[in-house]
Image (cartoon, rainbow, N blue to C red):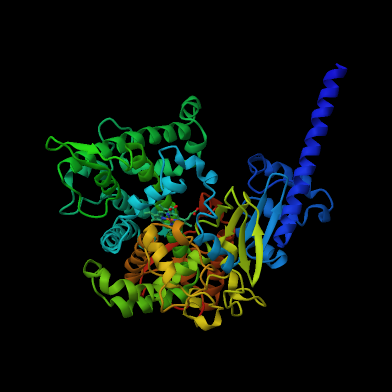
């Protein structure tokens, strides 16, 4: 018994010794960087802490504040969106969280962001954080090094202006589909819409299915458009295909809804749990695997016959670049040194994950913000009228319209939403394991030790007053508007920003080498943030491949909705329709203010689960024909 106790004591003493000496070593490493640092008991990405922090928080907070105040907040998941720029205002544009396990460098400085994103080999992606997304196959988002290069080269071929123009057309069709479901005769006129989150998800899903697989998905009551490929009708149908439990649309929608559960819990465990949700999640996974295999086989056969689907079809393109025609007619054979079958499936899945929720959430936030800010919506209407007049969306031409649209309030609303609610709030990087790396900030050199973890805190650099000129807030007395949603800021003069680092020739070469869209992130006619201070799509070789596609689909959907309609917050919680119609303007403004406050509070409580989204809450809205607004045409005048 005594020897067991002695052994336990020894193990404990060794653990304490090892914990303290690792901490001391990391503190001296942090000192070497010359950057501010805070000492914490564990790192923000220490999994057991992430999973159990809610249990520990009240215990830690029961101790005197001075014991935990300095380090606790940056350790709590979602700290950046909760605290905006506060922590960086306190510690500096870069600070290090030092724990025995690692140095975790938090970055909110444009100069540092530029160096880290452009020196990919020195600061590779922290792919460990994306491990769970690898289970459908190796892919461009989760790989690094040579494997990533190959995936990026092959997948990026589809992301070009020709396909952006094709997506422009499909986005018009899909946005019209959404509008029809909101205005169809069976709906009571001006009925409150409680499904904004689901409908924007469906919109993004229908477009990404077109982008990823060349499929035309339908809205309820819709029929396949003329010229659609009937062979793929089974995927567009709202009924389950033979041998499947769910329709293709429901398969993807359900799988994406339960994505975290599916990625974290083995399927056989899900099957053992007698709950409707776990069974549905497992069904969607099974059906996804089957549908994908069938689709891939069909595309391989197609490639063997030298056929191709019209439109953007990433999977088809991956198949064509990975399979060549065989000896026999109609036979496709894999090419050496390209993507395997599993790689193609992995990339198909990742495009869906990367391109679906990000775009859907951006769209969702923009619609809520426009309903919450009627003055901005009125300016949007004005710009849409000037650019598009009363032309029919089916006649809109990508080449002549996309630039003026991006330079108008359409682009400004998108930019502002991605500034204040970036889908990826923190972009994970690390210092290469074999060598320390030097970065320069404000003329000072700093050595970042090898293996240090880095977080580019998008949400905070987007609110750093050093880069974003602010004006007095119209919402919060005595504060500036840096934390408010103000699309009009994109019409402010770029001279107001530091603008020390305009794009250079080198930047463009780097983009060409790694594919994706080489154009600037925002329109040249709008406010040009200093490079590195606006990173909703990241930057450099590992920047988002789908940026142009996302921008196009969101801008088009906004134009389709707002050319004919206005979106207002529903005020049912505070007043009935009859009460509203009997109210004075002053009283109506009071009621609307309550809805605005509620909507802003919900947006403020958004959380990041894979991407930033509303935390199980929804904002009810009403779609009204322009000219029939109850509030939108005068509130906030
Ligand atoms: C508003 C919409 C979108 C936002 C805000 C967004 C944002 C981002 C960000 C921040 C990254 C870098 C992630 C990291 O380094 O950890 C990224 C990567 C990526 N995105 Fe997007 N994205 C959007 C839409 C799309 C769409 C529509 C697609 C595809 C159709 C797409 C495909 C990708 C891919 C493939 C990568 C990985 C690139 C690489 O690692 O080489 N994204 N995106």
Residue for point 46% across, 48% down:
145
When asked about the image quadrant of residue 90, the answer is: bottom right
Q: Vertically, is 10 above or below 406?
A: above
| Residue found at the far right of this picture | 2
Asked if residue 74 lies left or right of residue 342, the reply is: right
374 or 382: nearer the viewer? 382
Residue for point 56% across, 72% down:
590
Q: Vertically, is 386 above or below 41?
A: below
337 or 303: nearer the viewer? 337
Asked if residue 364 lies left or right of residue 44, the reply is: left
Q: Where is residue 337 in the image (x, y as percent from the top left)?
A: 32, 42
When asked about the image quadrant of residue 544, the answer is: bottom left
- Quadrant in the picture for the N terminus: top right
353 or 597: nearer the viewer? 353
Residue for point 61% across, 74% down:
466
Q: In which quarter of the image is ligand 1?
A: bottom left
Q: Position of residue 458 (x, y in %)?
A: 55, 61
Q: Where is residue 52 in the image (x, y as percent from the top left)?
A: 67, 40
Residue for point 21% across, 43% down:
232
When asked about the image quadrant of residue 413, the answer is: bottom left
| Residue found at the far front of this picture | 435
């Amino acid at each position: 018994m005594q020897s067991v106790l002695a052994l336990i004591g020894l193990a404990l003493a060794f653990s304490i010794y090892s914990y303290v000496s690792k901490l001391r070593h990391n503190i001296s490493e942090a000192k070497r960087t010359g950057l501010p640092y805070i000492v914490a008991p564990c790192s923000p990405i220490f999994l057991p802490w992430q999973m159990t922090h809610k249990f520990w928080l009240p215990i830690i907070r029961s101790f005197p504040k001075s014991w935990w105040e300095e380090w606790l907040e940056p350790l709590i998941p979602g700290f950046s969106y909760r605290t905006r720029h506060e922590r960086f205002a306190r510690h500096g544009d870069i600070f290090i969280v030092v724990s025995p396990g690692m140095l975790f460098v938090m970055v909110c400085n444009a100069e540092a962001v530029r160096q880290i994103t452009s020196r990919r080999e020195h600061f590779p992606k922290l792919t460990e954080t994306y491990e769970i997304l690898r289970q459908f196959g190796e892919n461009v988002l989760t790989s690094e090094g040579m494997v990533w290069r190959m995936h990026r080269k092959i997948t990026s071929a589809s992301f070009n202006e020709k396909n952006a123009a094709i997506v422009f057309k499909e986005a018009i069709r899909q946005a019209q589909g959404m509008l029809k479901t909101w205005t169809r005769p069976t709906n009571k006129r001006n009925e409150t819409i409680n499904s904004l989150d689901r409908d924007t998800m469906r919109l993004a899903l229908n477009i990404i299915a077109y982008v990823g697989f060349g499929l035309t998905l339908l809205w309820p009551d819709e029929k396949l458009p003329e010229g659609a490929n009937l062979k793929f009708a089974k995927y567009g149908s709202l009924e389950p295909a033979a041998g499947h439990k769910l329709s293709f649309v429901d398969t993807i929608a359900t799988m994406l809804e339960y994505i975290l559960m599916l990625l974290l819990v083995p399927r056989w465990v899900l099957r053992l749990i007698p709950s409707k949700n776990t069974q549905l999640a497992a069904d969607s996974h099974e059906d996804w695997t089957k549908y994908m295999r069938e689709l891939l086989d069909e595309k391989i056969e197609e490639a063997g016959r030298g056929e191709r689907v019209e439109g953007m079809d990433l999977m088809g393109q991956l198949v064509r670049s990975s399979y060549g025609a065989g000896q026999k007619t109609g036979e496709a054979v894999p090419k050496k040194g390209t993507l395997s079958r599993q790689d193609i499936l992995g990339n198909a899945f990742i495009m869906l994950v990367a391109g679906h929720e990000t775009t859907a959430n951006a769209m969702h936030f923009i619609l809520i913000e426009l309903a919450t800010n009627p003055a901005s919506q009125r300016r949007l209407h004005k710009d849409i009228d000037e650019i598009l007049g009363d032309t029919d969306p089916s006649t809109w031409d990508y080449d002549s319209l996309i630039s003026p649209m991006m330079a108008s309030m359409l682009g400004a609303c998108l930019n502002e939403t991605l500034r204040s609610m970036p889908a990826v709030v923190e972009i994970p990087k690390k210092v290469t394991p074999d060598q320390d790396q030097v970065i320069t900030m404000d003329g000072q050199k700093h050595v970042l030790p090898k293996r240090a973890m880095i977080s580019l805190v998008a949400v905070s650099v987007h609110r750093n007053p050093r880069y974003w000129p602010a004006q007095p807030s119209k919402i919060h007395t005595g504060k500036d508007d840096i934390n408010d949603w103000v699309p009009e800021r994109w019409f402010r003069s770029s001279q107001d920003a530091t603008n020390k680092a305009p794009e250079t020739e080198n930047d463009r070469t780097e983009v060409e080498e790694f594919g994706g869209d080489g154009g600037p992130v925002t329109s040249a006619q709008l406010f040009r943030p200093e490079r590195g201070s606006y990173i909703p799509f990241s930057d450099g070789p590992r920047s988002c491949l789908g940026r142009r596609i996302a921008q196009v689909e969101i801008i088009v959907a906004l134009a389709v909705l707002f050319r004919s309609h206005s979106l207002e917050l529903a005020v049912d919680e505070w007043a009935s329709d009859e009460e509203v119609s009997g109210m004075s303007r002053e009283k109506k403004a009071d009621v609307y203010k309550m809805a605005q406050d509620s909507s802003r509070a919900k947006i403020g409580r958004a959380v990041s689960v894979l991407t930033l989204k509303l935390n199980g809450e929804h904002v009810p809205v009403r779609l009204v024909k322009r000219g029939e607004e109850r509030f939108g045409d005068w509130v906030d005048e």
